[in-house]
Amino acid sequence: MSHEAQWKVRVELHEEDGRTTARADLETGGTPITGRGTARCAPGDADVPAIGDEFAAGRALRDLGDRLLEAAEKDVEAHGAAPEPRTSTPYAWPV
């Protein structure tokens, strides 16, 4: 069976008062999936919006990936199979 698909991800960023929020929307042609992420500038650090964008967008995309995996696991279970256990690596950076 051959299959091709094209999915689009849109990431929107908003920064205000040293806090950046990100929203990542995945369009698959079915139910849309959204991930969210935030970042904040630590007191005493230089306010560099591009760094906040990177952290917030990365966290939103990681959240989107987790939500996509959850959707896939539910689909697998709906077809009578058990999904493989997932593992995650913790990060030391504050959210």
Image (cartoon, rainbow, N blue to C red):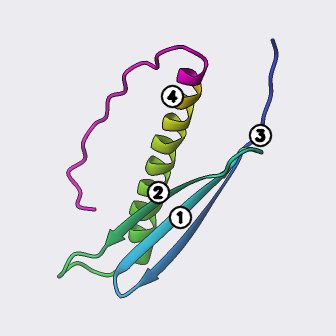
32 inside magenta stretch? no
Res 30 → quadrant: top right
Q: Secondary structure at mark 4?
A: helix
> Where the C terminus falls, by quadrant?
bottom left
In 3D space, how far apart are the residues under numbered discs 2 and 1 (Cα atoms)?
A: 6 Å
Residue appearing at x 34%, y 82% in the figure: 18
Alpha-carbon neighbours of circle 3 within 10 Å: few (<14), some, or many (≥20)?
Answer: few
Task: Say which of 26 and 77 sits in front.
Answer: 77
Asked if disc 4 and disc 1 are in contact, CB closer than 8 Å, the reply is no
Residue 6's disc is 3
Task: Say which of 14 and 72 sits in front.
Answer: 72
The residues colored magenta run: 76-95
Q: Which residue is mark 2?
A: 60
Answer with mark 4 or mark 2, whichever residue precedes in sequence: 2
Q: Secondary structure at mark 1?
A: strand
Count the marks: 4
Residue 23's disc is 1
Q: Is residue 65 above or below residue 42?
A: above
